[in-house]
Amino acid sequence: MPDPLLPLSVLPDTTIDPLTPEVIQLAQDLLVHKLYFAGSFALLFFDYFLTLADEVELIWKSRKAAIYYIFCVNRYCPMAFCVITLYAYTSPYWSEQFKFPHRVCRNADGVSYSCNRFAIVEWLQTLLIVVPAELVLIFRIFALTNRNKIICLFLSAFILVECVIVLYAMSLPGKNNALPLPHVPIDSFHVCILFSDPAMDTAYLATAIAFDSIVFGITLLCTFNRDCTWGRAPSEQPGSEIQLEPAAAASKLVSDPGPNCDSALSHNSLRDRFRRRLRLHNRRLARSQVPSGPLSRILDTMRWDGTLYFLVILSGNAVWMGLAMYSRPGLKFINAQPSMYLTSIMINRLTLSVRRAARHAEEATMQTDIEWPSCVLSRSQVPATPRARAPAENAAIQVSFASVEERAEGS
C-alpha cells in the first residue's frame, strides 16, 4: 500500500524492464563494482586507524607549515567523499528523477534531485583528491632535485592541464551524466555512477599518467644516482671555492716547479703525481656535494619509499585507464575512485615516513652531541700522530708548495 504522505509525483513506478542477457550482465558487473568499492572503503579507513597515532605525533604536534594543510586536505577529503559515494552506491532512493517528500524537505511540493546532478560532482571530487596529492609529489621532487624550479614548474603545468580538463568536462551539457540503468527493482541497480565522455576520460588519464611517469622517473634517477645535483654547478656548492684552492695551487706548481725543486725529480713525475692528486680531489669534492647526516637519511627515505609509492600510484592509474577504454559499461570506472583513494593512502604514508625519518635523524643527532662533546670532536684537541720521515722526493714537493705560498704573499 502506498504511503499516503507521498505526493502522486513521487509514487514508485511499477513497470519493470525485461531481464535480457545484457541486463543480467550489467547487474553482475555493478554488483562487482559495489563490492570492490566497499573493499576500498575498508582499506582507506583501516589505514587511517593504523596511522592515526603517527599522524598525531608527527603531523598535529609539529610545526604548521604548508605541507601540514595539504596533508589534512589529502587525508580527510577522500574519507568524506568515500562516505558520500558509498551512500550513492547503496541507497535505494536513486532513480532517474527522484523527489524527496515534504516530510524530509521544507517545501510542501517536494524538491527534485537527480542522479545526473550528483554524478557530475564526481569530476570535482576527482580534482579535490588528486591535486593535493600531486602537490605533495611536487614538494618531494623539489627536495630531491636540489630545489630545481624548472622541473617543478614543468610538473605544475600538468596539474593546471588537469584542472582545465575537469572544469571543461563539467561545463559540457548532456555529456557527463549518470550511467543509464534499466528499471529493475534489485540491489545492483540502486546505484549512482558517473558515465562521462570517453574523450574527457582519456585526456585526463593521459595527463595524470604522464605526470606520474615523470615523477617516477625522476625518483628512480635520484635513487640510483646519489651524486646528481640537478640545479647547481660544482662551483655553486657551499665551500667549493675554498676546496678548489689546493687544486689551483697544484696546477700552478706543475707549470712552475720553483727554483728549490730537486733536479733529480723530473718534471713528468711531478705532473703525474699532481694529476693523481687532482683526480682524488675531484672525487672528494663530488662526495662532499652529496648530503650527509640527517638530511641524507631524509632524502634516502624519500628516494626508496617514494619509488615504491609512486609505482603503486602509477599502476593504479594505468589500470583505471585500461578499464575506462576497453571494459564493459558496468566495469568501466570500477577502479576510478579506488585508485584515487589508493593515491591518498600512498601520499599520506610517504609524508609520515619522511617526518618519521626526520624525527629519528634529529634524535640521533642529539644523542651524538651528548655522547661526544664538541671538545672531543675538535681537531685541535686530537693529538698528532707521529709520521715517518718524508723522503727527499716529498721534501722537494713541500719546498715547492712553500715557495708558491711565499710568491703569493709577496705579490
Image (spheres, grey):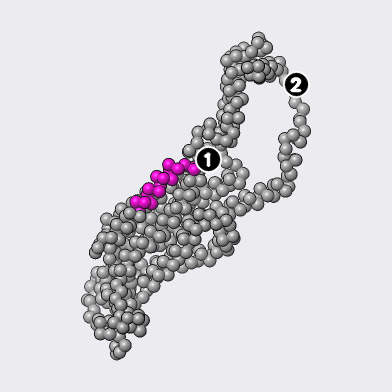
Q: Position of residue 244 (x, y in %)?
A: 58, 27
**Three-letter residue code for mark 2:** Arg
Tag 1 secondary structure: loop
Q: Is residue 203 magenta?
A: no
Q: Residue 248 in the image: x percent, y percent?
A: 58, 23
Front residue (pair 226, 404): 404
Whether 343 is drawn above or below 287: the answer is below
Left or right relative to 216: residue 110? left
Q: Position of residue 204 (x, y in %)?
A: 33, 54
Q: Disc 1 marks which amino acid?
A: Arg
- For the C terminus, give its image quadrant: top right
Residue behind mark 2:
389
Disc 2 on helix, strand or loop? loop
User: Residue 378 occupies which quadrant of the picture?
Assistant: top right
Task: Check if mark 1's residue and mark 2's residue have beta carbons within 8 Å.
Answer: no
User: Real-space Cα distance between discs 1 and 2?
Assistant: 40 Å
